[in-house]
Image: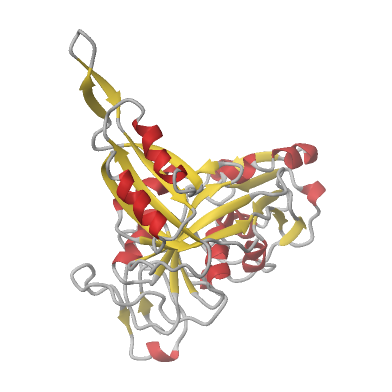
C-alpha cells in the first residue's frame, strides 16, 4: 500500500481505522494520498517533511537517540503513528458509533488512562498540545477531550484554566485518577542497575524520596509516556523511566517497582469536555464550575463568596488567574488621584446542580457583584475512587 498521512496517534487497545473524521474542508486540502489497495492494507506512515519532532529530549545530551528500527525486546514502535499536531489535523472515514476522545500526549499517558476510565470502550486520539485537543473537538474530529486540571500534590495546572476560558467547550464530566508511578526498564534489568531515569518534571518531583534511596539521577522529559518510549527505543540497561503501567505494556518495558510516589494518595483530577453542555439533574450529586471577574470595591470578594455560604453550598475549588487582556485596572485612589490594581478572574467549583433553585439564586445574586460571569459546566461528581 502507498499511504501518506499526517502524524497521528491511535490507541492500540482496539483495532482502528483513521481516528479523525469530519474535518471542515476549508481547513485541510488533499492531506491523504492512498492507492487503490489502501482498503485492504493496515499500515500508516508519517508524512514526509513534517518538520515536527515528537519531543525535544533533554536525554539527547546523554546520547539517547531514538532508533529508526525497533529493538527486538519491545513492540514495533514504527507501527504506532505520531501525535496529532495543531497544523496537521486530518479526516477520514471512521467508526462514528464509538466515542472518540482527544488528549495531550502519546499512548500510555495518564490522560489516556483517565479517558479509558470514563469511557472504557472509547477510541483515544493523542494530540501534540493541549490546544490541539481542544481544537479537535471544536472541528468535530473527536467527540470529547480530556484535560488534567489539578493534582493533589502539584496543585492546579494554570495553563489549562486559561484554555477553559479561551475555548467554548463545556465540562460534562470529571475523573479522579489515582497516580501509580512505576519505575520502568528494558526487559531483564533490575532496579539496582538503573542509574538515570527519565520522566515529566512533576513525576520526578513526586518520587524524590524513592529515587534518592536508589541513588538515581533525574532527567526531565516531555511527559511520562514519552520517557517510556525513549527508554524502549534506546535499549540501554542503565536508563529507566517513571510512567504508568499502561505505558509499560505499550512499549514493552518491565515494571521494576510500583507506587514509588512519595504520597500514596497522589490523585489527579481530569475534566471531560464536549461541544454541548450536559443537562443538569438532581438525581445524584452534581458539581458546577464557573468563572467570573468582580467589580472594584471593598469586600467585594467576600460578598461574592457569601452568596454560596448563605445557601449552604459548599465550594470545592477556588482559583484565581490574571486577566491577560486587561492585567491592570485603574481605580479610585487617595488624594493623589488614581491608582492601578491587578485584575483577576476567579474560577470556582461548587457542589450543587444548576437544576437546583438554590444554585440558580446563588448565581443570580453573584451577578450583582461581577462584571463578567460564565458557567463552564454542570456535571456529575466523581465519587468513585
Quick one: 68 or 59, which is closer to the camera? 59
Residue at x 37%, y 39% (from the top left corner): 304
Whether residue 322 is situated above or below residue 149 in the rendered picture: above
Q: Against 97, is 330 above or below?
A: above
- Res. 334 image quadrant: top left
Judged from this view, the residue extending furthest toward the top is 335
Q: Nearer the viewer, residue 28 or 79?
A: 28
The foreground one among 44 and 129 is 129
Quadrant the N terminus occupies: bottom left
Q: Is residue 176 visible?
A: yes
- What color scheme is it? secondary structure
Q: Position of residue 333 (x, y in %)?
A: 23, 15
Q: Position of residue 29 (x, y in %)?
A: 21, 72
Number of numbered discs on residues:
0
Q: Is residue 362 left or right of residue 157?
A: left
The residue that appears at 39% across and 83% down in the rendered structure is 96
Horizontally, residue 138 falls left or right of residue 101, namely left
Residue 229: image location, x then y, percent: 59, 59
Give the quadrant of residue 262: top right
> Vertical placement of 161 versus 94: above or below?
above
- Residue 34 location, x and y as percent? 33, 83
> Residue drawn at (39%, 64%), measured in percent from left and top?
355
Res. 129 visible in picture: no
Residue drawn at (41%, 68%) of the image: 144
Quarter holding the C terminus is bottom right
Amino acid at each position: 500500500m502507498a499511504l501518506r498521512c499526517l502524524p497521528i496517534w491511535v490507541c492500540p487497545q482496539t483495532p482502528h481505522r483513521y481516528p479523525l473524521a469530519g474535518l471542515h474542508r476549508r481547513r485541510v486540502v488533499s492531506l491523504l494520498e492512498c492507492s487503490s489497495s489502501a482498503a485492504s492494507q493496515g499500515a500508516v506512515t508519517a508524512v514526509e517533511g513534517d518538520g515536527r519532532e515528537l519531543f525535544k529530549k533533554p536525554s539527547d545530551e546523554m546520547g539517547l537517540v531514538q532508533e529508526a528500527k525497533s529493538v527486538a525486546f519491545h513492540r514495533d514502535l514504527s507501527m504506532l503513528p505520531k501525535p496529532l499536531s495543531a497544523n496537521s489535523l486530518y479526516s477520514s472515514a471512521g467508526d462514528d458509533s464509538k466515542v472518540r476522545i482527544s488528549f495531550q500526549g502519546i499512548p500510555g499517558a495518564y490522560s489516556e488512562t483517565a479517558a479509558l476510565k470514563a469511557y472504557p470502550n472509547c477510541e483515544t486520539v493523542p494530540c501534540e498540545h493541549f490546544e490541539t485537543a481542544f481544537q479537535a473537538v471544536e472541528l468535530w474530529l473527536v467527540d470529547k477531550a480530556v484535560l488534567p486540571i489539578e493534582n493533589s500534590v502539584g496543585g492546579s495546572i494554570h495553563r489549562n484554566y486559561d484554555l477553559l476560558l479561551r475555548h467554548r467547550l463545556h465540562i460534562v464530566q470529571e475523573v479522579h485518577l489515582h497516580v501509580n508511578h512505576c519505575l520502568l526498564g528494558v526487559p531483564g534489568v533490575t532496579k539496582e542497575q538503573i542509574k538515570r531515569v527519565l520522566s515529566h518534571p512533576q513525576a520526578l518531583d513526586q518520587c524524590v524520596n524513592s529515587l534518592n534511596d536508589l541513588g538515581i539521577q533525574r532527567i526531565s522529559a516531555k511527559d511520562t509516556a514519552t520517557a517510556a518510549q525513549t527508554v524502549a527505543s534506546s535499549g540501554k540497561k542503565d536508563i529507566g523511566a517513571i510512567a504508568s503501567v499502561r505505558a509499560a505494556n505499550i512499549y514493552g518495558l518491565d515494571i521494576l517497582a510500583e507506587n514509588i510516589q512519595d504520597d500514596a494518595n497522589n490523585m489527579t483530577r481530569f475534566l471531560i469536555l464536549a461541544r454541548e453542555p450536559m443537562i443538569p439533574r438532581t438525581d445524584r450529586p452534581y458539581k458546577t464550575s464557573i468563572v467570573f471577574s468582580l467589580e472594584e470595591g471593598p469586600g467585594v470578594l467576600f460578598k461574592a463568596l457569601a452568596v454560596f455560604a448563605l445557601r449552604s453550598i459548599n465550594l470545592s475549588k477556588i482559583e484565581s488567574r490574571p486577566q491577560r487582556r486587561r492585567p491592570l485596572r485603574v481605580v479610585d485612589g487617595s488624594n493623589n488621584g488614581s491608582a492601578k490594581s491587578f485584575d483577576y478572574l476567579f474560577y470556582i467549583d461548587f457542589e450543587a446542580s444548576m437544576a437546583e433553585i438554590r444554585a440558580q439564586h446563588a448565581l443570580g445574586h453573584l451577578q450583582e457583584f461581577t462584571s463578567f460571569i460564565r458557567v463552564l459546566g454542570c456535571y456529575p461528581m466523581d465519587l468513585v475512587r
